[in-house]
Image (tube, grey):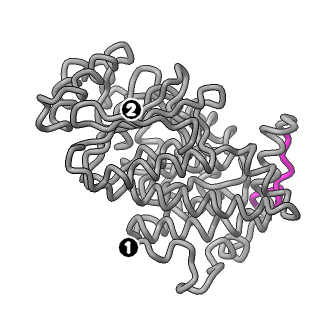
Amino acid sequence: MSEFVQSEVRGKTGFITLTRAAALNSLSLEMVRGITAVLLQWRGDTQISAVVIKSNAEKAFCAGGDIRFFHQKGTASATGGAALVEDFFNEEYALNFLIHHYPKPYIAVMDGVVMGGGMGIAQAGPQSRLRIVTEKTKMAMPEVAIGLFPDVGGSFFLSRATGKTGTYLGLSGEAIGAADALYAGLADVFIPAAELPALMDLLSSDTVQDVRLAVQEFAAPFASQADPATSKLASVRSMIEQHFAATSVEQIMQSLAADDAEFSRKTLAVMQKRSPLMMCVTLAQLQHGAELDVADCLRMERTMVRRCFEHGEVIEGVRALVIDKDHAPKWNPPALSEVTTEMVGQFFNPAWPAYAHPLRDLI
């Protein structure tokens, strides 16, 4: 069990609390293992009818994977660091799959920052999930900013977001709030942060028969405070659909460049800072993911991660944005015009025979 993962049972509900507040609950390998162990223990426990995962940090639910760890271990193969990176992604993606198919209601309280790996432990399958957002929610899949791609099942849940919203979020890495998340289909209910203690008390009661219904009824009076119909994303839907329906990143950026609207200019400026290669890889990922189930999405992403570390783009991205903080990554290749179909295709070439894939048992 990780020191940063606490678990307790109150009433018929199991509560998992992330406690690595100083690092915005960035997931370590030990945290992944801690969450997995608890969920496996509770999966068959008939005394537990639902699971809540939340944070005790004021600013974040979970800011993603520990990218400092990726940089440190990914550049330390002589000391076995690369093996630990492999372990992290194997076990994180297995956890994402476990959550997606969890047999009990799984309630994620996405209060504060929820990015990358945080999305992976919040976006459960439709049969079990209940995703709560608050006025403090800041949601993103910002991986293209560090030379990665939206993993942890992003190929599944982003490709199924409203319209072309998932493509926009994956290629830009931009953050959204509560109403946007509800509009995009990445959240289910809004509850003000000040009301969360009362909700936790309700879910701790032995009298609750249907946890998901109880949460929905609790949230109902607050629905007007985060109306998806009036969200920022809804207000620019026509532009998102127009620009991000293109079949290549080059066409998307050309379309944005031809539009003088503030949204288009801002989005183009953001994308011009991202890894050209990884934007192209991400678009291909989402196109593939739309046709795959979650197990095959995670297997595809696991191959992509291997290829990403082989290429080195993520190591350079983390160096520039997190380690040296010069914010001047030397992307390879540096320009979108230099990205070839063959370069993108390499990220999807099998890294293992099917029988040896580390996630071969996900079904």
Residue 330, image x and y in percent?
A: 86, 51
Residue 74, image x and y in percent?
A: 79, 57
Compared to 120, does 138 lie above or below?
Answer: above
Name the residue located 31 percent from the left edge and 44 percent from the top edge.
106
What residue did someone put label 2 on?
A: 109
Q: Secondary structure at mark 1?
A: loop
Compared to 106, does 153 lie above or below?
Answer: below
Amino acid carrying label 1: it is: Ile
Left or right: 356, with 153 as reference point: right
Q: CA distance from mark 2 to mark 1?
A: 27 Å
Q: Is residue 330 within the magenta segment?
A: yes
Q: Badge 1: how crowded within 10 Å, few (<14), some, or many (20+)? A: few
Residue 26, image x and y in percent?
A: 61, 38
Q: Badge 2: how crowded within 10 Å, few (<14), some, or many (20+)? A: many
N-terminal of the pair, mark 2 or mark 1, is 2
Left or right: 52, with 265 as reference point: left
What residue did someone put label 1 on?
A: 363
Q: Are marks 2 and 1 in contact (CB under 8 Å)?
A: no
- In front of the other: 296 or 336: 296
Residue 89, image x and y in percent?
A: 61, 59
Name the residue located 70 percent from the left edge and 69 percent from the top edge.
307
- In front of the other: 312 or 105: 105
Name the residue located 63 percent from the left edge and 67 percent from the top edge.
304
Q: Is residue 356 within the magenta segment?
A: no
Provide the residue span drawn in magenta. Answer: 328-336
Q: Secondary structure at mark 2?
A: strand
Q: Quadrant of the C terminus?
A: bottom left
Left or right: 211, with 241 as reference point: left
Please name the predominant secondary structure of the magenta segment in the image.
loop
Compared to 297, does 235 lie above or below?
Answer: above
